[in-house]
Amino acid sequence: MKYSEYQPRPDLLKDKIILITGAGDGIGRAAAISYALHGATVVLHGRSLNKLEVIYDEIESLGAPKPAILPLQLSTASSREYEHLVDMLERQFGRLDGILHNAGVLGERVALADYPLEAWDEVMAVNLRAPFVMTQALLPLLKKSASASVIFASSGVGREARALWGAYSISKIALEGMNQIFAAENSFPNIRYNCINPGATRTAMRAKAFPQEDPLSLPTAEKLMPAYLYLMGDDSLNMNGASINAQD
């Protein structure tokens, strides 16, 4: 199917509780608003409380279900902080129906021979360790869902190693592998795991990676939402361990 042409029903995510990391701007922000408008109660994660509060107010003004806010520094989050996250979601909602692991950092666009260790550690912490630790920690809440969807944000350089993409490419290649292993182990049949590659999109990260590119030549994050809705909703119940392109 052409994911970009998917037409979700208006109540696709009605009554679902969905956590979105990196919801402060770009694709995460677009997904938060789109999921909310399709009936979900979204839990907004990000580094900037101010940005999350703006999105919170916007979602409320649209008449969508009241969201929740979860500030958490993924690069340094401790086991205790993840336990607190689980406790908070357990108390407030009792379950979780989906996670969109959208948060990510680009790191440096330099050769591995010159790659700074601090940048490497931050990229691996946010892009790889955090999605693993958060997914593992939240499994008890995902188990309580009738059908839970976990989506990992991949990249073209997560399918094929590319020079000068350093830790970012390596983290995304590893993420693709983690997605397949979670799916293959099928520890809880009600939980499915899939990757999505947004492709070239008009975001701040893309502008940092390609400063010479005209951002107006790229699709907005909102244009990608059909694919993001498809993977999160029950129309993708039979898809597990896949990796799709949002613009296909």
Image: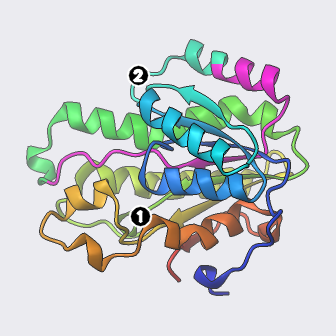
Percent position of residue 64, x then y: 73, 49
Q: Nearer the viewer, residue 248 or 110?
A: 248
Residue 19, image quadrant: top right
Whether residue 99 is in magenta: the answer is yes
Q: Amino acid at mark 2?
A: Thr
Q: Nearer the viewer, residue 58 or 42?
A: 58
**How many angstroms separate mark 2 from mark 1 (CA)?**
23 Å
Q: Secondary structure at mark 2?
A: loop
Q: Is residue 215 left or right of residue 143?
A: left
Whether residue 53 is in magenta: the answer is no
Q: Amino acid at mark 1?
A: Ser
Percent position of residue 105, x then y: 33, 45
Q: From this viewpoint, which residue is outermost toward the right?
A: 146
Q: Nearer the viewer, residue 214 or 111?
A: 214
| Quarter that holds the N terminus | bottom right
Q: From this viewpoint, which residue is outermost toward the left?
A: 114
Label 2 crowd bin: few (<14), some (14–19), many (20+), radius 10 Å: few
Give the numbered dot on residue 51: none
Percent position of residue 50, x then y: 43, 30
In the rendered image, which residue does mark 2 sit on? 76
In the rendered image, which residue does mark 1 sit on? 155
Residue shown at the point (20%, 74%) measured from the top left:
214
Q: Secondary structure at mark 1?
A: loop
Residue shown at the point (40%, 22%) measured from the top left:
76
Q: Is residue 12 left or right of residue 210?
A: right
Label 1 crowd bin: few (<14), some (14–19), many (20+), radius 10 Å: many
Q: Earlier in the sequence, mark 2 or mark 1?
A: 2
